[in-house]
């Protein structure tokens, strides 16, 4: 990916991220062809398979390094109907071209994705950088749509936790000393608050005259008495 696209968000403040300009939106959209393309979703172990954007029958970019390593010669000229937008977009000349450094790295120093069409990214493959992994490309339309709803949800919960009920933001309600004690106390307060939220939701949504079903009240299973005399492992009968 060109440096201009890779560092499009470097140094931007919060206001520029929350309300991106047209130029920033264009730079974010221009990143899309260079991203690894999903080949197989995560399995039970969290491993995901990606393939190179220059590989496949419909590559998103052209890459001289890919052509050199996989011995792909120049494609034969083909006639293109310029009035057909699909044919124009599929032509290699219309796709972004990856520009490797000059001179390029030695073959043995190239990443694995350059030697094979696909790679498998497993959980914790990035080590301490794994916490920065995102399922959605940063500031992409899908990311923005997900981020807005999640952020609104989180801010709403934070507001309720710091409200008049739990009042989690008041230090007087968190008198424990030490980070560990504070963490455990906050976890307990959040648990109690969540239970209170569920009770409020049920009180609001359940009709007042609605009968209480057996599922609403805990039932202790009682085994029927079949007349069998008690064994040595059971409680003896009451004294006469």
Image: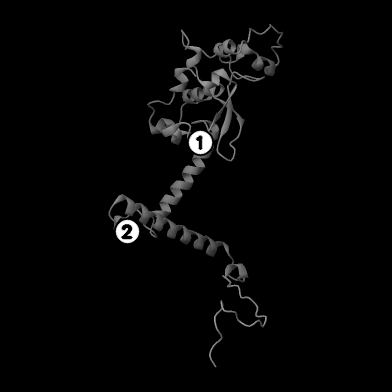
Please indicate, yes or no, whether residue 213 appears anywhere in the rendered image: no
Q: Which residue is mark 2?
A: 173
Residue 136 is situated, as x and y percent measured from the top left of the image, at: 53, 33
Residue 11 is situated, as x and y percent measured from the top left of the image, at: 37, 26
Q: Is residue 58 left or right of residue 11?
A: right
Q: Residue at the spot x=38%, y=30% of the render?
A: 13
Q: Which residue is mark 1?
A: 123
- Estimate how packed mark 2 is, as few (under 14), some (14 to 19) or many (20 or more) residues with alpha carbons within 10 Å: few
SS at badge 2: helix
Residue ranking furthest to the bottom: 240
SS at badge 1: loop
Q: Earlier in the sequence, mark 1 or mark 2?
A: 1
Quarter the C terminus occupies: bottom right
Q: Which labelled disc corresponds to residue 140?
A: none
Q: Residue at the spot x=58%, y=30% of the render?
A: 49
Question: Could you give the CA–CA distance between mark 1 and mark 2, rounded to whole angstroms?
Answer: 39 Å
Q: Residue at the spot x=45%, y=51% of the render?
A: 157
Report the number of numbered marks: 2
Residue 50 is situated, as x and y percent measured from the top left of the image, at: 58, 27
> Would you identify the image quadrant in which residue 47 lies?
top right
Q: Is residue 30 left or right of residue 83?
A: left
Considering only vertical position in the picture, is 234 above or below 87? below
30 vs 179, nearest the viewer: 179
Please indicate, yes or no, whether residue 75 appears anywhere in the rendered image: yes
Give the foreground label among 1 and 2: 1
Q: Residue at the spot x=53%, y=21% of the render?
A: 112
- Estimate how packed mark 1 is, as few (under 14), some (14 to 19) or many (20 or more) residues with alpha carbons within 10 Å: few
> Would you identify the image quadrant in which residue 68 lies?
top right
Considering only vertical position in the picture, is 117 above or below 41? above
């Amino acid at each position: 990916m060109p440096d201009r696209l890779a560092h499009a968000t470097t140094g931007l403040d919060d206001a520029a991220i929350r309300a991106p300009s047209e130029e920033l939106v264009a730079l974010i959209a221009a990143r899309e062809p260079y991203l690894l393309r999903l080949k197989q979703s995560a399995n039970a172990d969290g491993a995901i398979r990606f393939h190179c954007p220059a590989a496949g029958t419909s590559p998103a970019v052209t890459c001289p390094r890919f052509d050199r390593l996989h011995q792909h010669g120049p494609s034969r000229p083909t006639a293109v109907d310029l009035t057909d937008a699909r044919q124009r977009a599929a032509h290699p000349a219309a796709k972004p071209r990856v520009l490797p450094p000059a001179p390029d790295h030695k073959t043995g120093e190239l990443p694995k994705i350059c030697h094979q069409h696909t790679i498998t990214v497993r959980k914790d493959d990035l080590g301490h950088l794994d916490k920065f992994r995102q399922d959605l490309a940063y500031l992409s339309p899908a990311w923005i749509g997900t981020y807005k709803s999640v952020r609104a949800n989180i801010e709403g919960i934070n507001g309720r936790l710091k409200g008049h009920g739990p009042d989690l933001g008041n230090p007087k309600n968190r008198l424990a000393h030490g980070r560990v004690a504070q963490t455990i106390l906050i976890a307990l307060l959040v648990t109690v608050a969540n239970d209170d939220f569920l009770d409020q939701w049920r009180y609001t949504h359940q009709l007042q005259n609605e009968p209480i079903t057996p599922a609403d009240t805990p039932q202790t299973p009682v085994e029927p008495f079949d007349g069998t005399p008690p064994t040595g492992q059971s409680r003896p009968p009451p004294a006469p």
